[in-house]
Amino acid sequence: MTTLGAAVRNDVRERRTAKGLSQAELAERMDVSRQTINSIETDRYTPSLPLAIALARFFGVTVEEIFHADHY
Amino acid sequence: MQTITRKSYKYLATPIFGVLMGLVYLVAFWAGGSLAYGVFGLVVMVAFSLLLLVARRRSETVRGLLDHRDERITAIDLRATAVTALAMIAVVLVAFVVEIARGQSGWPYSMIGAVGGLAYLVAVIVLRIRG
């Protein structure tokens, strides 16, 4: 189940800025809202597995390379 | 090849439902002999519907709730609905206890509580079967 509280760390912001994309542009590519991208980047929201995979594919990395769940 | 872009009017569903409910209030109050209350109910519902349409232009959250729903908004909506249900359950329980303490039958709160409990059980069973 998607959780809103216990988020895992991620490198979405670093990878997005490295590509020269705004939050709104990445949101449009992922078919989510800009707020959702912002919440993911600030570790306030853990995306669903499909969205995590879509983000990883978009940046050309594996899910583990972009999301870091140290406590598991 | 020509691409046809269809404009979605999905965002109008909730405001239209609000106005329709306002009309239902109007007719119900009118039938009950309280036309003024009915007009007030309709005005409130029309105002609420217009407020939603105005807020949609300014708020990404309202826009998400009305028509551009993504997984985070869906999760927020689900949790907000659960909080609303908890508040309603608390009100029904308190009202039921107060009513029976006053020597009444507890109606209609007993019926509302029974429907709620049954709905929860059915939902758990169906969702459990669906995995």
Image (cartoon, rainbow, N blue to C red):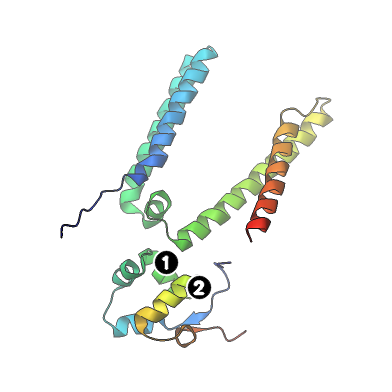
Q: Chain of mark 1?
A: A
The disc at residue A36 is: 1
Picture residue at 25% right of the left edge, 50% below the top: B6
Picture residue at 47% right of the left edge, 26% below the top: B41
Q: Position of residue B95 (x, y in %)?
A: 73, 35
Q: Position of residue A45 (x, y in %)?
A: 50, 70
Q: Nearer the viewer, residue B100 or A11?
A: A11
Disc 1: CA contacts within 10 A as few (<14), some (14-19) or many (>=20): many
- Give the side of residue B113 with respect to residue B40, left or right: right
Is residue B64 positioned above or below B19 on the image? below
Which marked residue is nearer to the observer: mark 1 or mark 2?
A: 2
Q: Position of residue B98 (x, y in %)?
A: 78, 33
Q: Chain of mark 2?
A: A
- Give the side of residue B93 with respect to residue B45, left or right: right
Q: Quadrant of residue B69?
A: bottom left
Q: Position of residue A55 (x, y in %)?
A: 40, 77
